[in-house]
Amino acid sequence: MFEDFRFICEYFDAPVFFALSGVGDFMVSYGRSQRLLERLLGLDVEVALDTNGAALQEFPELAPERLEKLRFINLTMHYHQIKQKNLLERWPANARIILERRFEQTHPDYILSPPLRDEWEEAIAFYAQTVYAHTGRPLIPVRDVNRPFTPDDEDRLARLYARFGEVLKGEYVEDFSAAFRDRPEVMCPAGVRYFRVWNDGRVQGCPNLPNVPSLHDCGNVKERRLTVRKALFRCDTPAFCDCSAIDKLGMMRTPVE
Ligand code: SF4
């Protein structure tokens, strides 16, 4: 997999920002002896990392100059799985190491899933005792967009904010279209400077518009193929995860009439 990263960096011959996210956890996708994160951070890159904190691999040993290239760490506490997999000691120890090494850049969050509502309070109390008490870093509640809250869930959440005070901070609502309410059209760099690379090597500029071939199929890094669009795409459906990610990276443009 390292050679895939290197191929991308060499192809663009410029700093590359990798967002390591999606199905499966990057940190458990390789063995510790491979030191993949360390080698990746040795390239001309910046990295945003989504992790569930179950495994740290070589993270605790990263040299400061490599650690600095980790610009954002989204640390999600999957409390139900932490209990099921008997990680009640290991997970908070890992979370504390991540925060110790990259405090400002780490954003711990917890998905409030309505089917697991009876566990919400226990989960937040666990975080409060094992992570917040040692680090002072609050937990960001995230609404599960796929399962709407009932009025009772809203009350429950309000009571949790009241009980836990500073432990819970803010709230993340995954409404990707919100940033585009006043911008129904954008000039998008998908396929030019933004790509989504799948685990099997497929590269897409935008996975949301299958009827635009130059956006939907940009090659395959495992076959060492990349096809890059020359021009930005004028898009009137900016409402998805990728659109939001591109916008947050400051790469989305307003159309010029
Ligand atoms: S704005 Fe979103 S939907 Fe439109 S091309 Fe870009 S990534 Fe795709």
Image (tube, grey):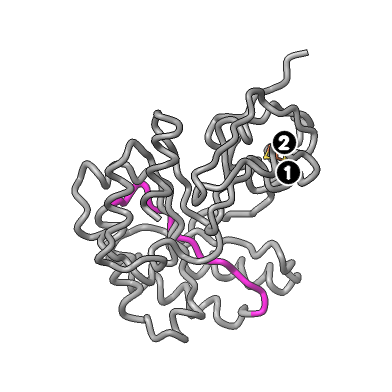
**Which residue shows up at 64% across the image and 29% down it?**
229
Above or below, comparing residue 245 to residue 80 in the picture:
above
Quadrant into which the N terminus falls: bottom left
Figure quadrant of residue 139: bottom left
The Cα–Cα distance between marks 1 and 2, rounded to whole angstroms, is: 7 Å
Residue 104 painted magenta = yes
Figure quadrant of residue 184: top right
Above or below, comparing residue 167 to residue 203 in the picture:
below
Residue receiving disc 2: 180
**Which amino acid does the dot numbered 1 rest on?**
Ala
Q: Is mark 1 within 8 Å of ligand 1?
A: yes
Side of 89 where 176 appears, left or right: right
For the residue carrying disc 2, how many other residues have a C-alpha within 10 Å: few (<14), some (14-19), or many (20+)? some
**Which amino acid does the dot numbered 2 rest on?**
Phe
For the residue carrying disc 1, how many other residues have a C-alpha within 10 Å: few (<14), some (14-19), or many (20+)? some
Residue 126, image x, y percentages: 41, 76
Side of 58 where 214 appears, left or right: right
**Which residue shows up at 66% across the image and 79% down it?**
115
Residues 214 and 88: in front is: 214
Above or below, comparing residue 221 to residue 78 in the picture:
above
Quadrant into which the C terminus falls: top right
Q: Which residues are magenta?
A: 102-115
Marks 1,2: beta carbons within 8 A:
yes
**Which residue shows up at 56% across the image and 66% down it?**
111
Residue 211, image x, y percentages: 80, 43
Figure quadrant of residue 195: top right
**Which residue shows up at 65% across the image and 65% down it?**
144
Residue receiving disc 1: 239
Residue 88, image x, y percentages: 36, 81
- Say which element carries label 1: loop
